[in-house]
Image (spheres, grey):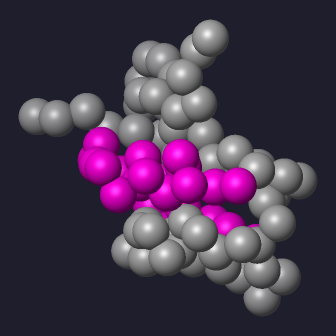
Amino acid sequence: MGDRWHVEVDRALCIGSAQCVHLAPDAFHLDSAMQSHPSDPEPDANERVLKAAEGCPVEAIAITLLGSGEPVFPPEE
C-alpha cells in the first residue's frame, strides 16, 4: 500500500488564483468566496496534488504524511 497524505489549504493565505484547480482539478475546488479546498483531505500520494501545492503562488497548500505528520510540501529547510 502506498503513502497517504493529509492536505490542508491555509485560507488566510489563499488568494483564489485557482492554480491548484488548473493543475489538479480532481483534487481541489474553489468555493463561492474563491477559496480553495481539497476535494479529499486525505488522498493517496500523487504527483498532481504535489504539483498543485508547488504551483500555488502563495504556498497556501501544505501536505504532510498521514499518520506521522512528516512534511511533504513545503519541505523542511
- Could you tell me if residue 46 is visible in this image? yes
From this viewpoint, is residue 9 visible?
Answer: no
Which residue shows up at 48% across the image and 18% down it? 70
Pinpoint residue 68: horizontal percent, then vertical percent. 44, 17
Q: Position of residue 44 (x, y in %)?
A: 28, 47
What range is drawn magenta here?
A: 35-57
At a point 56% along the width and 55% down the height, the residue shown is 55
Q: Is residue 56 left or right of residue 33?
A: left
Between 73 and 41, the one nearer to me in the picture: 73
Tell me: residue 38, above or below residue 58. below
Q: Residue at x 17, y 35 (%)?
A: 2
Q: Position of residue 60 (x, y in %)?
A: 72, 49
Name the quadrant of the N terminus: top left
- Give the quadrant of residue 16: bottom right
Residue at the far top in the pictured view:
77
What residue appears at the point 53 percent right and 33 percent down from the top-left corner?
A: 73
Q: Is residue 32 magenta?
A: no
Quadrant of the snapshot with the C terminus? top right
